[in-house]
């Protein structure tokens, strides 16, 4: 059986695909499945998926912009080229199913699947459906969503809410082991700060501005983004002159799965952007959170994601316009001076979580293949 995965190429698209692939590999015989990924060139994606024995096929694609830009002219030619290549590959591979995570990079592959009548399944991570998902959903057999009230989807009868697939390797950490992992020996609470896969300059700047005060009361694990890491190291060394205090600061450019798992396990409070992937990882780890949605995200989806999480009681939302350094610092201190609030938030986070999303989607795909073709033996 052949399954083709496709998506936009960002971490928000790739990590859920990784989670589903691992469920497929972990519960069903490798010999029964051939897994492919079709998408734009992206080295991080290709490295991550090649480790999972997924065959990569590069498919050109252009962004589906809603505004006037010179890039629309160039990207106009990429899409038909991508469709032609995907269609050509489909003839030789004869895939049984296409699974799309949405994003502009998925469109040529899904369009080719539509042309050749290959069954299409889609997952939308955000509380507001992206443009590619809205188009592709009209051709899909099922549309899986992370949020119960995902907006902008016309094909409501196809929608199945399962949550956002979370990699199991970022779950299940042990707090004692995590503190040893980060060489934390103080009894101070731990702040785990996530800026998304690319880092967040405004959050980084905010943390630097209040870093000396933070380190008096907290241990700080900070994922800065690789592009920002060296500058953060330089500035933090100047801002925090006391070598003992600097030992309470644990910056990372990019965090691998082991580091993330331990970061969540050590954390007393998570501070994060509001991408769906981050929110559902926080929830699956049952952590309270302060979410800072990215302003200007497509259709303001991060704000919609964050307010859905807040409504569950899992955390609080601070819009970036309201992100004043000392107000933010006092908000953190207030939460830790009221541990009952943090406990309630942790319970709300747990209530929001849907940790079996990857397994549900994997089972759904395999049940479809079972009904349509031949049984697939479990290990």
Image (cartoon, helix red, strand yellow):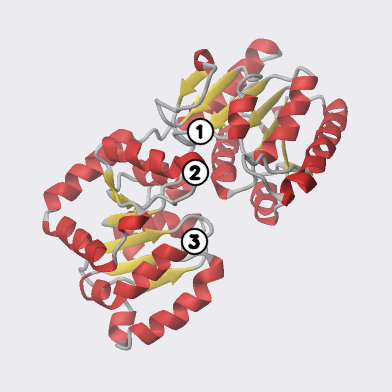
Looking at the image, residue 186 sits to the left or right of residue 352; the answer is: left
Residue at image location 22% in from the left, 60% down from the top:
332
Residue picked out by circle 3: 199
Residue at image location 41% in from the left, 67% down from the top:
204
SS label for mark 2: loop
SS label for mark 3: loop
Residue 262 x, y percent position in the rendering: 39, 58
Residue 191 x, y percent position in the rendering: 30, 62
Q: Disc number at residue 358?
A: 1
Residue 74 visible in the displayed image: yes
Q: Rate crowding at label 1 as few (under 14), some (14 to 19) or many (20 or more) other CA atoms within 10 Å.
A: many
Residue 189 visible in the displayed image: no
Residue picked out by circle 2: 167
Q: Are discs 3 and 2 less than 8 Å apart at CB?
A: no
Q: Look at the picture and state if 61 lies above or below 136.
A: below
Residue 70 x, y percent position in the rendering: 73, 51
Q: Are discs 2 and 1 less than 8 Å apart at CB?
A: yes
User: If you read the primary sequence from the N terminus, does the residue marked by circle 3 or circle 2 appear first?
Assistant: 2
**How many angstroms separate mark 2 from mark 1 (CA)?**
8 Å
Looking at the image, residue 209 sits to the left or right of residue 61; the answer is: left
On the image, which quarter does residue 5 sit in? Answer: top right
SS label for mark 1: helix
User: If you read the primary sequence from the N terminus, does the residue marked by circle 1 or circle 3 appear first?
Assistant: 3
């Amino acid at each position: 059986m052949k399954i083709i995965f496709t998506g936009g190429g960002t971490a928000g698209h790739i990590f859920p695909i990784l989670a589903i692939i691992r469920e497929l590999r972990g519960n069903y015989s490798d010999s029964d499945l051939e897994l492919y990924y079709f998408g734009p060139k992206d080295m991080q994606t290709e490295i991550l998926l090649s480790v999972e024995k997924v065959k990569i096929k590069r498919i050109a694609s252009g962004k589906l912009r809603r505004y006037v830009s010179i890039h629309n002219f160039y990207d106009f030619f990429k899409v038909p080229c991508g469709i032609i290549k995907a269609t050509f590959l489909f003839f030789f591979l004869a895939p049984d199913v296409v699974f799309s995570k949405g994003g502009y990079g998925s469109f040529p592959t899904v369009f080719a699947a539509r042309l050749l009548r290959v069954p299409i399944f889609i997952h939308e991570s955000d509380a507001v459906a992206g443009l590619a998902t809205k188009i592709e959903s009209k051709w899909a057999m099922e549309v899986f969503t992370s949020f119960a009230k995902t907006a902008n989807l016309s094909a409501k009868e196809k929608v199945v809410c399962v949550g956002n697939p979370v990699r199991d390797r970022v779950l299940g950490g042990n707090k004692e082991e995590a503190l040893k992992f980060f060489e934390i020996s103080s009894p101070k609470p731990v702040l785990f700060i996530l800026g998304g896969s690319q880092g967040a300059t405004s959050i980084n700047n905010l943390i630097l501005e209040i870093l000396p005060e933070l380190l008096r009361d907290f241990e700080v694990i900070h994922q800065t983004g690789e592009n920002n890491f060296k500058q953060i190291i330089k500035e933090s060394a100047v801002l925090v002159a006391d070598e003992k205090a600097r030992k309470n600061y644990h910056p990372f450019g990019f965090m691998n799965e082991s580091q993330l798992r331990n970061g969540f396990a050590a954390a007393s409070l998570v501070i994060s952007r509001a991408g769906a992937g981050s929110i559902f990882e926080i929830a699956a780890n049952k952590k309270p959170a302060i979410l800072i949605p990215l302003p200007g995200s497509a259709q303001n989806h991060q704000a919609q994601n964050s307010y859905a999480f807040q409504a569950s009681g899992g955390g609080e939302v601070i819009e970036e316009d309201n992100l004043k350094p000392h107000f933010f610092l006092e908000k953190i201190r207030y939460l830790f001076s009221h541990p009952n609030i943090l406990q309630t938030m942790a319970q709300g986070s747990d209530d929001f979580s849907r940790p079996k999303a990857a397994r549900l989607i994997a089972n759904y795909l395999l049940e479809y293949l079972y009904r349509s073709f031949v049984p697939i033996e479990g290990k």
